[in-house]
Amino acid sequence: MTKQILKAYKVRLYPNEEQQIFFAKSFGCTRFIWNRMLSDKIEHYKKTKTELKNTPAQYKKEFEWLKEVDSLALANVQQNLRAAYSKFFKGLGFPKFKKKGQRDSYTTNNQKGTVAITDSTVKLPKIGHINAKFPSKVSGLIKSATVSKTPSGKYYVSLLVETVIEVLPKTGSNIGIDLGLIDFIVLSDGSKVANPKFLSKLQHKLAREQKILAKRREVAKADQRKLSESRNYQKQRIKVAKVYERITNCRKDFLHKLSFNLIKNHDVIAIEDLNVKGMVKNKKLSIAISDSSWSAFTTMLAYKADWYGKKLVKVDRWYPSSKTCSGCAHVLTKAELPLQVRSWNCPSCQQKNDRDINASINILNEGLKLATLKTVGATGLA
Ligand SMILES: [Zn+2]
């Protein structure tokens, strides 16, 4: 069985000087139009208490240079701003102004081949073919392209492609996953997946380079030089950005492989629905959680389960997965199981429980219960 999906491919770009100038202009114009439209909306609201329905076209007379960039890039800003506003009306925070160098990017759409690829180039509106390096074969219909520049100065284009994939066969195996404190994850089959060693090595390197950067900032300050004019500071800033980008890429790669393997080898995957934002406030857990990118991981599991015909079940985070004995369902009190206790003997059935493995078994059992309930509910409705 096949399925049509939307998949994003991140492709490294090698623009020439002229193309780099075009990109800089495009980042500048999209940032400008975002900030300008947003501030006009705010002013209008202050006066009239209604939302201003402004469009990028209205600004092209006053700011002629907006015509030099891809008009679809500006149209996408309008759409994103509208999306940000509807988020705001749902109580999810007010749209923010954009600063230069902060996620420089713009998005364009493919209109009958305006965005296209060859073996070694990506074609974009208004600028033509740009040298590119593809990490894997891109197949399918390109819907949109987002060009971005990283703080270390690398260019990428993310191509959103409509493509067809083969649904994965059922395996008859199910798995529960618990977020480990020492390991990245602990599985109900008793295995543990550690955080990759190269990541912690890179993190130490990052800390070292950041220290040097802080020193250079101090030196520039003492000499009363602007940071933008301090060559040593700028050189180090790029070095830090490069290490940071490597960490992000390595981690993403690790999470992609891990999530794919879990989806491939199991039919029902049960995880705890953690409120990571709430937990990061708890300092004891913060390092482990933000480092291990739990939420990125669960997002990948969710869309891959959907793509490949498997089932991801999220177990309520208030379910006492750690404190319940997977053998007899006896529940310990909070005082009986402090965080530092890694294994415990059940006072009721004497089973020896590894804290994390026991939790993941409970998550699996609860997840399977929920999965059956959901299926029954769905059939009942039909
Ligand atoms: Zn027990």
Image (cartoon, helix red, strand yellow):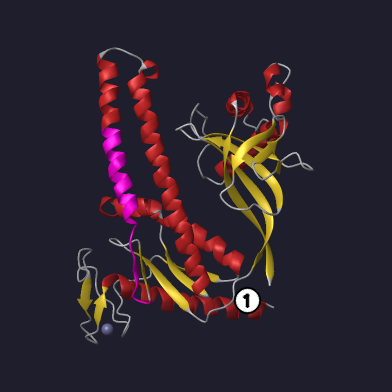
Q: Nearer the viewer, residue 19 or 343?
A: 19
- Quadrant in which the C terminus is drawn: bottom right
**Image-based side of 104 in relation to 271, left or right:** right
Instruction: Please give left or right for residue 375 compared with residue 70 in the image.
Output: left
Q: Which residues are magenta?
A: 189-211
**Based on the displayed image, in which of its 4 quarters is residue 120 positioned?**
top right
Question: Whole-percent x and y of residue 171?
Answer: 53, 79
Q: Quadrant of the N terminus?
A: bottom right
Q: Quadrant of ligand 1?
A: bottom left
Residue located beneath label 1 in the image: 378
Mark 1: few, some, or many residues within 10 Å (few <14, many ≥20)?
Answer: few
Q: Nearer the viewer, residue 180 or 215?
A: 215
Name which residue lies at 34% across and 75% down. 190
Which residue, as the protein is rendered here, is positioned at the far top? Answer: 224
Q: Residue at x 46, y 74 (%)?
A: 367
Residue 265 pos. (x, y %): 49, 73
Secondary structure beneath label 1: helix
* Res. 230 visible in picture: yes
Q: What residue lies at 70% left-to-right and 22% top-to-bottom?
A: 68
Magenta stretch contains residue 199 = yes
Q: Is residue 109 part of the magenta span, yes or no?
A: no
